[in-house]
Image: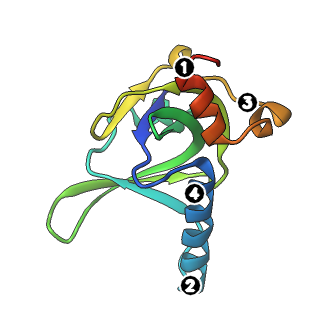
């Protein structure tokens, strides 16, 4: 059974922001002749790698809500130039919107059990309303 990670998407105002950042990053890697893959660097290295790579995803918290996920494809520990252990989480560059749910701020990442992971939104549900409107309606208790 897959295990997931939960992480704050610092700096992104919306899923669209994250999508644009991913596209820019992939284009920049391609222009520099690097492998065209999306990685996210973390300080801590997950110890449950096997479970995470058995179909796990990285769930992104944007503006206080779990908003979307990306499939994990590899986990590559390394030591940076300062001698600090770090990790590249290699992600499928496709975002899957999920049923939004509130999340308080935290540092680093957290493991997320499959039973606690929000379900993916399908087609019309995912595009039905803008993220900002959905957040506003939720804050008013209307969703």
Q: Nearer the viewer, mark 4 or mark 2?
A: 4
The circle drawn on residue 129 is none
| Local crowd size for mark 1, using a 10 Å CA cut-off: few (<14), some (14–19), many (≥20) | some
Q: CA distance from mark 4 to mark 2?
A: 24 Å
Query: Would residue 113 appear left or right of 96 to someone viewing this image?
Result: left
- Up the image or down, 81 lies above or below 93; here it is below
Circle 1 — which element?
helix
| Local crowd size for mark 3, using a 10 Å CA cut-off: few (<14), some (14–19), many (≥20) | some
Residue behind mark 2: 33
The circle drawn on residue 17 is 4
Q: Going 59% across and 39% down the picture, which residue do you hit?
A: 68
Q: CA distance from mark 3 to mark 4?
A: 19 Å
Farthest-out residue, right: 124
Q: Earlier in the sequence, mark 1 or mark 3?
A: 1
- The quadrant of the picture occupied by the N terminus is top right
Residue 6: quarter of image:
top left
Q: Are marks 2 and 1 in contact (CB under 8 Å)?
A: no
Q: Nearer the viewer, residue 45 or 26?
A: 26
- The quadrant of the picture occupied by the C terminus is top right
Query: Would residue 82 appear left or right of 2 to someone viewing this image?
Result: left
Residue 55: percent from left, percent from top: 60, 33
Query: Would residue 43 appear left or right of 24 to someone viewing this image?
Result: left
Circle 3 — which element?
loop
Q: CA distance from mark 2 to mark 1?
A: 37 Å
Farthest-out residue, top: 115
Circle 2 — which element?
loop
Query: Would residue 142 appear left or right of 39 to someone viewing this image?
Result: right
Residue behind mark 3: 121
Residue behind mark 1: 114
Q: CA distance from mark 1 to mark 3?
A: 16 Å
Q: Earlier in the sequence, mark 2 or mark 1?
A: 2
Q: Are marks 1 and 3 in contact (CB under 8 Å)?
A: no
């Amino acid at each position: 059974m897959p295990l997931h990670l939960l992480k704050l998407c610092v700096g992104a105002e919306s899923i669209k922001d994250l999508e644009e950042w991913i596209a820019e990053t992939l284009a920049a890697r391609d222009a520099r002749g690097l492998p065209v893959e999306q990685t996210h660097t973390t300080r801590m290295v997950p110890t449950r790698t096997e479970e995470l790579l058995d179909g796990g995803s990285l769930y992104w918290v944007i503006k206080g809500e779990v908003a979307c996920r990306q499939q994990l494809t590899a986990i590559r520990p390394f030591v940076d130039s300062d001698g600090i252990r770090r990790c590249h989480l290699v992600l499928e560059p496709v975002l899957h919107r999920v049923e939004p749910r509130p999340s308080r701020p935290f540092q680093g990442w957290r493991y997320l059990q499959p039973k606690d992971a929000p379900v993916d939104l399908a087609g019309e549900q995912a595009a039905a309303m803008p993220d900002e409107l959905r957040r506003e309606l939720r804050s008013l208790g209307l969703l």
